[in-house]
Image: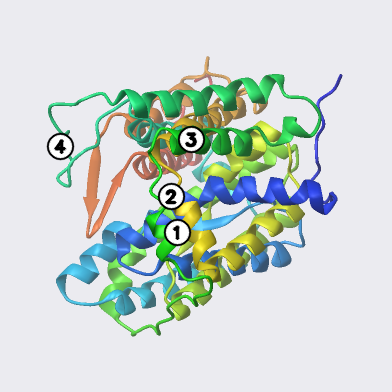
């Protein structure tokens, strides 16, 4: 029997949509809350503005792109530089507004000149590698949460000696196994909520094993408004944050292409990359003015769609509404924050692995011919830059992993394009 697929524009009954939306909420919650915590701001404001931003994004894209906007990690390093050296988070907010305006500008560039230039700067040989590295770069974090790898210290060194916690391993592996076998064995409606089911089962197991601290739930108020704060215009902060905008642009394009492959839709053309950039840009402008963190399309939610084959924008909108509600309901948002690391680590091992496989899927579907040296070299250098651990610091921004891979692939692609225009490229290669 063919597996059920829920299309982008398809609406489901409320009793089906609610758990599917909650499944997306749990997938993105950890990252959306962690980023503002690391930047020193109220996580509730990020949850609120990400929810509002997602609703705005789906409206601007005419309900044609199932993407959730969550807190971006690309800006953590420059924000910490700003807040620890001379300014406050308010100063960094002016950089977020610039980031939003940059995306709005790029949306007009795409609308005016189209997307053919993307094939020049990021051909399939590069894009497939970048997408795969998105998952591969996140996988070690999942392994650390799952208790399978040691956490690094603040200086990046591994904590020694590394002691295996059996309880952590048990919870993470049970969660992972339920997600794995549920994805291939569940039938009917259970077939589309294996991630949510695995998280709930893992949470209950962790609770029984005494790994859940409910104190934060008891102390939380039922109703509380997020903390808003106005931006302070700061040219220096804008200059510090600006390089990260390029990294997030590459990530945005990669995510849109992957989502298009998963949903079997050409989202780059319809509703279009220009609408996607515009929606994300306006959302970030609002975040900058309200005191929230900048956002980006979330790989975790792409992984959920790839596994469940539920692509409905209405389900994504439901997750956004839940995020808005939870940002104001103190006890509910507190309860979600009590999900133990082993539970999230177990399920994200699966989600991040799926994202990595989407990159290799692009190679197959785009029919990238690696017998040609140009494709082999582009893919090889992009992968090497992304997984080697190499890092290049430009100003306050450190390029490594997916960011360095994208930059290396783009630069090499442009060089090859120039060689081709000059007639010095060997066509047989």
Residue 32 lies left or right of residue 141; in this view the side is right
Residue placed under numbered mark 3 in the picture: 348
Q: Nearer the viewer, residue 330 or 237?
A: 330
**Real-space Cα separation, disc 2 to disc 3, in angstroms:** 16 Å
Tell me which corner region of the image, top left, top right, bottom left or bottom right, holds residue 41: bottom left
Which element type, helix, strand or loop, lies under badge 2? loop
At 50% from the left and 77% from the top, the residue drawn is 225
Circle 2 packing at 10 Å, graded few (<14), some (14-19), many (20+), is some
Can you tell which of label 1 and label 2 is closer to the viewer?
1
Query: Could you tell me if the residues under marks 1 and 2 are in contact, i.e. CB atoms within 8 Å?
Result: yes
State whether residue 186 appears in this view. yes
At 41% from the left and 44% from the top, the residue drawn is 212
Q: Which mark is residue 338?
A: 2
Whichever of labels 1 and 4 marks the residue nearer the N terminus, that label is: 4
User: Quadrant location of the N terminus?
Assistant: top right
Residue 339 lies left or right of residue 75; in this view the side is right
**Real-space Cα separation, disc 3 to disc 1, in angstroms:** 24 Å
Residue placed under numbered mark 4 in the picture: 157
Whichever of labels 3 and 4 marks the residue nearer the N terminus, that label is: 4
Which element type, helix, strand or loop, lies under badge 3? helix
At 28% from the left and 62% from the top, the residue drawn is 78
Whichever of labels 4 and 2 marks the residue nearer the N terminus, that label is: 4
Whichever of labels 2 and 3 marks the residue nearer the N terminus, that label is: 2
Spot occupied by residue 187 in the image (x, y as percentages of width and height): 78, 25
Kindly give the residue lying farthest to the top in the view shown: 371
Can you tell which of label 4 and label 2 is closer to the viewer?
2
């Amino acid at each position: 029997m063919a597996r059920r697929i829920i299309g982008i524009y398809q609406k489901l009954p409320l009793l089906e949509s609610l758990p599917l939306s909650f499944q997306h909420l749990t997938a993105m919650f950890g990252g959306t809350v962690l980023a503002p915590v690391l930047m020193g701001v109220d996580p509730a404001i990020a949850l609120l503005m990400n929810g509002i931003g997602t609703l705005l994004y789906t409206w601007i894209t005419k309900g044609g792109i199932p993407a959730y906007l969550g807190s971006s990690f690309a800006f953590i390093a420059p924000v910490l530089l700003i807040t620890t050296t001379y300014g406050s988070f308010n100063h960094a907010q002016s950089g977020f507004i610039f980031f939003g305006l940059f995306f709005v500008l790029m949306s007009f560039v795409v609308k005016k000149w189209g997307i053919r230039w993307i094939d020049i700067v990021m051909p399939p040989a590069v894009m497939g590698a970048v997408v795969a590295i998105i998952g591969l770069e996140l996988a070690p974090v999942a392994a650390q949460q799952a208790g399978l790898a040691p956490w690094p210290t603040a200086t990046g060194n591994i904590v020694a000696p590394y002691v295996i916690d059996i309880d952590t391993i048990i919870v993470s592996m049970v969660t992972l196994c339920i997600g794995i076998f549920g994805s291939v064995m569940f039938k009917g409606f259970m077939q589309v909520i294996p991630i949510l089911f695995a998280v709930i089962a893992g949470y209950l197991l962790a609770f029984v094993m005494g790994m859940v601290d409910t104190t934060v739930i008891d102390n939380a108020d039922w109703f509380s408004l997020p903390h808003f704060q106005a931006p302070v215009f700061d040219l220096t902060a804008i200059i510090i944050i600006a390089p990260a905008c390029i990294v997030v642009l590459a990530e945005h394009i990669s995510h849109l292409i992957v989502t298009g492959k998963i949903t079997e839709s050409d989202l780059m053309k319809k509703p279009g990359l220009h609408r996607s950039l515009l929606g994300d840009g306006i959302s970030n402008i609002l975040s900058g003015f309200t005191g929230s963190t900048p956002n980006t399309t979330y790989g975790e939610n792409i992984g959920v769609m790839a596994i469940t084959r539920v692509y409905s924008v209405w389900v994504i909108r439901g997750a956004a509404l839940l995020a808005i509600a939870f940002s104001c309901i103190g006890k509910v948002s507190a309860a979600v924050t009590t999900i133990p690391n082993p539970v999230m680590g177990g399920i994200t091992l699966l989600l991040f692995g799926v994202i990595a496989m989407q990159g290799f899927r692009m190679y197959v579907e785009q029919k990238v011919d690696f017998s040609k040296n140009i494709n082999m070299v582009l893919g090889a250098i992009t992968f090497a830059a992304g997984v080697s651990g190499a890092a290049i610091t430009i100003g306050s921004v450190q390029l490594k992993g997916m960011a360095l891979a994208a930059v290396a692939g783009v630069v090499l692609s442009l060089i090859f394009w120039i060689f081709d225009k000059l007639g010095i490229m060997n066509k047989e290669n």
